[in-house]
Image: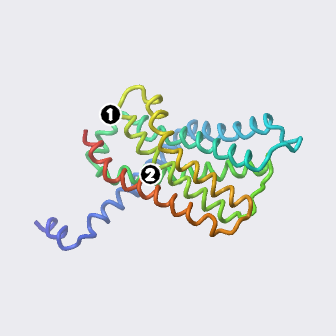
Amino acid sequence: MPCFGRLFADPLYLYRIMWEEIITLVKKEATLEWRQKYALNGILLYVISAVYITYLSVGVKSGTLQVPTWNALYWIIILFSSVNAVAKSFIQESQGRQLYYYIIASPESIILSKTLYNTALTWVLSLLGYLVFSVVMGNPVQDQTLFLCNLLLGSIGFSASLTMVSSIAGKAGNNGTLMAILSFPVLIPILLLTIQISHNAIDGLDRSVSTDKIITLLAINGLIGASSYILFPYLWKS
């Protein structure tokens, strides 16, 4: 009875419990990632190799790489790197481990922790790709702050979408194919907006030009996050 009384007396009690669960699950994700260094190293190698192959293919030395091409190639590499990094969120989880999570944590805490961790991972990959791209292929960006903020918003959108899609694919067979089919239609609007905002940052246009696109991107991220938070418990219990 005292426990139930505390729940009704303190509405924030459940949220504190959820926050503790989220922190614990995020630490677990980071620990597993550090143990399985081959997975993280493989993703980093993928980013660096993709940038180097692009460097050899598009003729950067001859000065033929245009700014729109630089922008598009960068986001294509980040998109596929994000897919490779986030796809394993639920696909690699065994049924025994999922049952264990089902017992010790709420589904809301699980989806939020996965999304937060994948956002951080995608953000790091985006920054690494930007650094390597800048060193190897030059850096035409004039508004660095807007470009980095766009990277963060894109990372949030990619990770939220791919985390939910990974949870759906993890419940079905042929996970890789289903992941590709479900993820790219969802990611296309986010990709188009991030490319447009980064193009404005590269050209150094006034930030008011990108305001409507940033608001739209924030709305899409919020819609995806809210949908994941509401729908994931039903998927998790199935």
Identify the residue at horizontal 26%, vertical 64% (top origin).
14
Q: Going from the N terminus, do you reach mark 1 or mark 2 first?
A: 1
Residue 5 drawn above or below residue 179? below
Looking at the image, residue 83 sits to the left or right of residue 136; the answer is: left
Colour convention of the picture: rainbow
Spatial CA distance of label 1 from label 2 is 20 Å
The amino acid sitting under disc 1 is: Gln
Quadrant of the snapshot with the N terminus: bottom left
Looking at the image, residue 131 sits to the left or right of residue 232; the answer is: right
Q: Position of residue 53 (x, y in %)?
A: 75, 35
Q: Which mark is residue 3?
A: none
Disc 1 vs disc 2: which is toward the camera? 2
Label 1: how many Cα within 10 Å (few below 14, some 14–19, many 20+): few
Question: Pointer 2: what residue?
Answer: 115
Q: Residue furthest left?
A: 1
The amino acid sitting under disc 2 is: Thr
Residue 175 drawn above or below residue 35? above
Residue 103 drawn above or below residue 211? above
Q: Quadrant of residue 207?
A: bottom right
Residue 204 drawn above or below residue 123? below
Label 2: how many Cα within 10 Å (few below 14, some 14–19, many 20+): many
Q: Quadrant of residue 49?
A: top right
Q: Residue furthest right?
A: 62
Identify the residue at horizontal 28%, vertical 70% (top origin).
12
Q: Residue furthest bottom?
A: 9
Q: Position of residue 133 (x, y in %)?
A: 74, 48
Question: Which of 223 and 158 lies nearest the eye of the viewer?
Answer: 223
Judged from the image, the secondary structure of the residue bearing numbered disc 2 is helix
Q: Position of residue 94 (x, y in %)?
A: 37, 33
Question: Which of 26 and 34 lies nearest the eye of the viewer?
Answer: 26
Question: Pointer 1: what residue?
Answer: 95
